Image (tube, grey):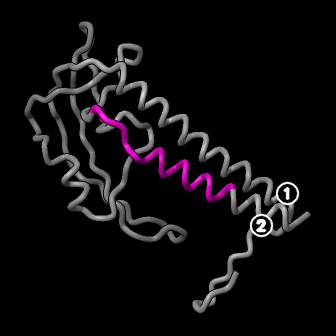
Amino acid sequence: MANDSGLRVTGPDTLGGAVLYLVVGIAIASYGGFDYVQQTEAVRNSVEVDANITELGIETDSGTSSNPGVKYEPNVEFEYTYNGTTYTGTKLYPANIERNYERRSAAESAIDSYEQGTQTTAYVSPDEPGDAFLKNKTSNAPIIAIGLGGLFTLFAAFSAVKKL
């Protein structure tokens, strides 16, 4: 596929390469689906605990040559006690896939309701007490992974069919 910019996207050169891309796409989409189910269960089964915010900040990622652009990730650290054991948590949402933001202000707004040194409510799943989170709702990051994995899979399937 060519466009006015001179960029050409042709896909993998061999059927084996197309199949490999297909497997990678399915893996990405599957992991996103798995993470979405996990975070939904964590929200459903969570219990409230008191937590103390110990660190807040924004991490800047400059990207790579294949994925340029600056991304911002809110970072939070908090301590909480569940059933007599003290833990340290770092998650805003229950998803394992971290959410990044295009604008620093968006990342800051994700943590603006928290202040270092203050007490807040965290949520913990009794089945995984060491994996607490601050926002008792699902993140859209796994949905994005499902979509990207699905697109990658479609692209790979189309390339594989062309190679047959």
Q: Is residue 10 above or below residue 160?
A: below
- Mark 2, other Cα within 10 Å: few <14 / some 14–19 / many ≥20: some
- Mark 1, other Cα within 10 Å: few <14 / some 14–19 / many ≥20: few
Contact between labelled residues 1 and 2, with CB atoms less than 8 Å apart: yes
Q: How many marks?
A: 2
Label 1 residue SS: helix
Image location (x, y in percent) of residue 92:
29, 38
17 on left or right of 83: right
Label 2 residue SS: loop
* Image mark for residue 71: none
Which region of the structure is painted magenta?
A: 136-153
Q: Is residue 18 above or below residue 110?
A: below
* Image mark for residue 12: 2
Q: Residue furthest right?
A: 164
Is residue 145 inside the magenta stretch?
yes
* Image mark for residue 16: 1
36 on left or right of 19: left
- Residue plotted at (22% across, 20% down): 48
Q: Residue furthest left?
A: 118
Q: Report the front residue among 82 and 142.
A: 142
Which corner quadrant of the image does residue 148 belong to? Answer: bottom right
- Residue plotted at (13% across, 41% down): 114
